[in-house]
Structures are given as C-alpha cells and as structure tokens.
Amino acid sequence: MNPVAAVGRQWRKRRIQWARWVLRPTTRGRIVVEPNPPDAQPPDDFRFFAVLGTWMEEDVVEATVRNAFAQGVEAVYIVDNASTDATVERAIAAGATLAESFETDTYEERVRILLMNAVVARVSLSSGAESIWWLWLDADEFPEGPGGVSVAEFLRGLDRRFRSVGSTCYNHFPTGKPEYISGFHPIDFQPECEQYTSSYVHHCVQSHWKHPLQRFDRHDLFILASSGFHTGALRTREPVLEPVGGIVTHHFPYREESVTRRRLELLCGGPARNAVNDAIGNRMIQRRFESLDAVYTQNWPQVNNLRGEAPSLGVQPDKWSEPTSTRRWYDMDELEAAKEKWSNDSSSTSH
C-alpha cells in the first residue's frame, strides 16, 4: 500500500471523527411534553422567522419560501451550500434573504447545521427582540398548523413555557404527471402520502420525527438545533418543553422526475460520492437515489421506506386526509392554467 495514501486516508478518517464529535447533538437535555394550559400566556410581542437550508433547489425553493410566508413568518433566511443553479435568485425573488453561503465538495449536513445555528443566533441577537420563534426548514418541507390554522396562529395560542414544537411528518409520492410544476404547493400534484415513523428512533414521547419550531429567548439559554432539526437541546440538564400535539410537515423529496434524478445523481452518482455520503451520515439520500425507479413507476413494495430497519422496503401511500388544511398563495384558476399549459407543451414536444 502507498504509505502516503495510507496516511492521507487515516487523516481524513480522523477529521471526520473529530467533526462528528464537535458537531454531535447534545445528550444532556431532553424534550418533555406537557398539555397547553387553557389560560395560556404566550411571550409578549414575540417575532416569527424561518431559516432555510438549500442546495440546488431551484425547482421548489420559491414555493418553500412562499409557503413559509403563508404560515405567518415575517422573514426567511437562506443558508445555501453554494448552489450553482438559480436557487438563491428564486428564493430572493420570493422574498427570502441570503444569510450565508458556503462551498463544500459534496453536500455536508454537519456544516450546514452549524451555520444555520450561527445564523439563528446572529439574527436573533441583532434583532432587539425578546423572543423569536424560528421555523427550521429544508427546501422540500412544507409545514402547516393543525386543524386549518396557520403556524403563526398556533404559536399565538401557546404558553410561554414551551420553547419547542414537534411535527408529524408525511412523505409524499408522485402518482401521475406532472409530478410537480414550480411555484405551486407540491400537495396539489402529490396528495398521496404516508406518515413517517420509526420504531427505534424516538426524539420525544410523541414520536415526532422533527422539532422544527424552536424559540430564542434573549434572557434564557440558547437552544441548539441538531442535524436535520430532529431535536433542539440546551447545554444543561434542564429539559426543553413541547406541547401535546404540534404541527404537520409535508415532505416532497420526489418532484419532477428528470429534475429529481439529476439532483440525486449529483449527490450520489458513483462509488466515491456514495462513500462520502456514508461517511458523513447522509444515508437517507443514498436510499432515495436507489429507490427512484420504483418511485416513478409506483412500485411501492420496492421503495425504501427510509426507516433504517427491517423491512427496509415498502411504502403504502394514501391520499392526504385533510385537503382543506393547506394554505395556498395562488388561486385554483392559476393552478389549472399551469397544468393545462404543461399538458399542451408536453403534447407538442411528443409530436
């Protein structure tokens, strides 16, 4: 074996181990659940912002930003992994602010979460606000409040003791054409979904897969979001409280087929990239990549369910049960016109 190459591999291994240790989620804190009291007293004059991590998301990022505003946020801050497409431009056009841009050889979740936490801390401290609720987002995530209310309305009825809110997550799947048209809520193209749960990973007793709402309080300890926003924790043994219930997050990882294939090929194409994804903990990305043929032929028994447990294959999507709960920033006439244009363009291309 080439001794120089061996030393290089050992150095890279140690660097990854160091990064995992430095950026590891804290295990000191814990999430504790309590019911929201009938005489709830929310923080006085709290603000509501969103922080959005992006990488090559030009097809969907406009809708992600507009959905956040539809749910009541005042501002959306982007942390972009040096996208070379129109991600940043389309996000800004939809009203977002570019807060941070960084460049890595491949998508790096640990770097991203470090910088997103830094943006939340920096913006919060400079805002002058006493309290800020932050909505943490991936570009393929579309949260909504429970029972038809917006997320902002939900927070306005929440007692000040709660500094975290969990989310029930639904993975959506394409069942027809078009799989998605940019600018619209993906649920109008992909109503079929399956609730995502894991029998061996529990971030709270309510089995919330993510806790995307976390509150900054100027005179209290900072909550540090973990990778993927699955939890938020204090660097003490003091628990973080969340209410019974929570919000809903619609997840759309499989959008227009050619776009999705191209993006995942950039992330996962070739053994070198696969090895990097495994090393830095992006195994879910690899599993989606391997499931593309099954997803776009609706071969549900062969789709990886991403639970990381046996059986690893098989999903059972069903139509979203509360279609009236979703808020749109457009009317249905615009949607139908876009679908008709897509159909006409597809017909002319096929001939």
Image (cartoon, rainbow, N blue to C red):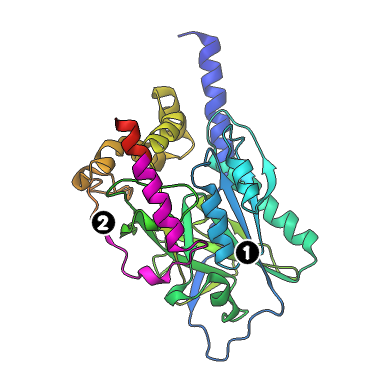
Rendered position, 228 above or below 59:
below
Residue 219 visible at all: yes
Percent x, y of residue 199: 31, 59
Give me the residue at 48% from left, 64% from top: 328
Quarter of the N terminus within the rendering? top left
Rendered position, 307 above or below 222:
above
- Circle 1 packing at 10 Å, graded few (<14), some (14-19), many (20+), is few
Mark 1 lies on residue: 236
Nearer to me, 134 or 333: 333
Dot 2 amino acid type = Pro
Percent x, y of residue 102: 65, 36
Q: Nearer the viewer, mark 1 or mark 2?
A: 2
Mark 2 lies on residue: 317
Residue 245 visible at all: no
Give the CA distance from mark 1 to mark 2.
40 Å
Residue at the bottom extreme?
A: 39
Please tell me which of labels 1 and 2 falls first in the chain.
1
Whether residue 323 is in magenta: the answer is yes
Percent x, y of residue 166: 48, 67
Give me the residue at 48% from left, 82% from top: 35
Rendered position, 266 above or below 185:
above
Dot 1 amino acid type = Thr
Report whether 277 appears left or right of 305. right
